Image: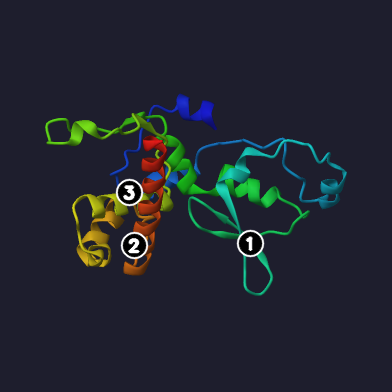
Amino acid sequence: MESQANENPSIVHLDDEIHLDEVEEIENEDIINEDTDDVDVDNPEDDHFMPKSRKRASWWNDLIILDLPIGEKKAQCKYCNVKLSYRKGGPTTHLSRHINKKCQMRRIHERKQSKINFLPIDSSSEGCSTIVLPPLHDGKFDMLKMREVAVHWKLMHEHPFSILEEEGYNLMMKRARPEWTKISRNTGKSDCVKVYEQEKKKLKTLLR
């Protein structure tokens, strides 16, 4: 996948809207990326003969295993949130096929990675020069990290907890990243307590 992304000079910016013609173009691409660690769906018993120390396929990092209330398990794609059938020790070809070939959101994400993103630091603003930001990021959306950043922003500017539930704020965040999910007031309070405890531990370590 990485070599194909380098051959394709096109770049999809984070703020670009996804058009149907773009999706059709992606669907027409001839991508063959069979993972050698995959299990043949026609012979699921192969799973039992594989060494336990065998390296796990990289596409597993793009899936989340969900435990449903009815006792069933599902594998959820981190990019498009589609839920796929999953059984421990069962066939996994359909999972790798979805990640490597079918998931349009992952393909678009791979194209975005052809551009290195630098996080800006506004040194002209008072106090901003003391904030250390990572110079690079992988562009992959992580809602847990977004919650942490939102809490730091709320505490930094002493915003009320209700701001996290405001319609305008959530519309703005949803427009920036469609994967964004609304943070409730109670979740915001809980996250603030966690951040407070983390910062307190850091301060104690520095004062030792």
Which of discs 2 and 1 lies nearer the camera? The answer is: 2
Which of discs 1 and 3 lies nearer the camera? The answer is: 3
Instruction: Give the position of the N terminus as an image quadrant.
Output: top right
With respect to residue 153, does 38 lie above or below? above
Tell me the number on the disc at residue 18: none
Q: Amino acid at mark 3?
A: Val
Which comes before the other along the chain, label 3 or label 2? 3
The picture places residue 200, in percent across and down from the top left corner, at: 37, 48
Instruction: Give the position of the C terminus as an image quadrant.
Output: top left
Dot 2 alpha-carbon crowd within 10 angstroms: few under 14, some 14 to 19, many 20 or more: many
Q: Which residue is mark 2?
A: 188
Q: Amino acid at mark 2?
A: Gly
Seen as rendered, the residue at the extreme bottom is 70
The picture places residue 171, in percent across and down from the top left corner, at: 25, 60
* Secondary element at tag 3: helix
> What's the residue at 77%, 36% (across, down)?
54
The picture places residue 151, in percent across and down from the top left corner, at: 31, 54
Dot 1 alpha-carbon crowd within 10 angstroms: few under 14, some 14 to 19, many 20 or more: some
Dividing the picture into quadrants, the one containing residue 12 is top left
Using the image as rendered, state which of residue 82 and residue 208 is in the foreground: 208
Q: Which residue is mark 1?
A: 74
Using the image as rendered, state which of residue 85 and residue 64 is in the foreground: 64
Give me the C-alpha separation between circle 2 and circle 1: 28 Å
* Secondary element at tag 1: strand
**As drawn, is 138 to the left or to the right of 126?**
right
**As drawn, is 70 to the left or to the right of 114?**
right
Give me the C-alpha separation between circle 1 and circle 3: 30 Å
With respect to residue 142, does 166 lie above or below? below
Q: Which residue is mark 3?
A: 149
Give me the C-alpha separation between circle 3 and circle 2: 11 Å
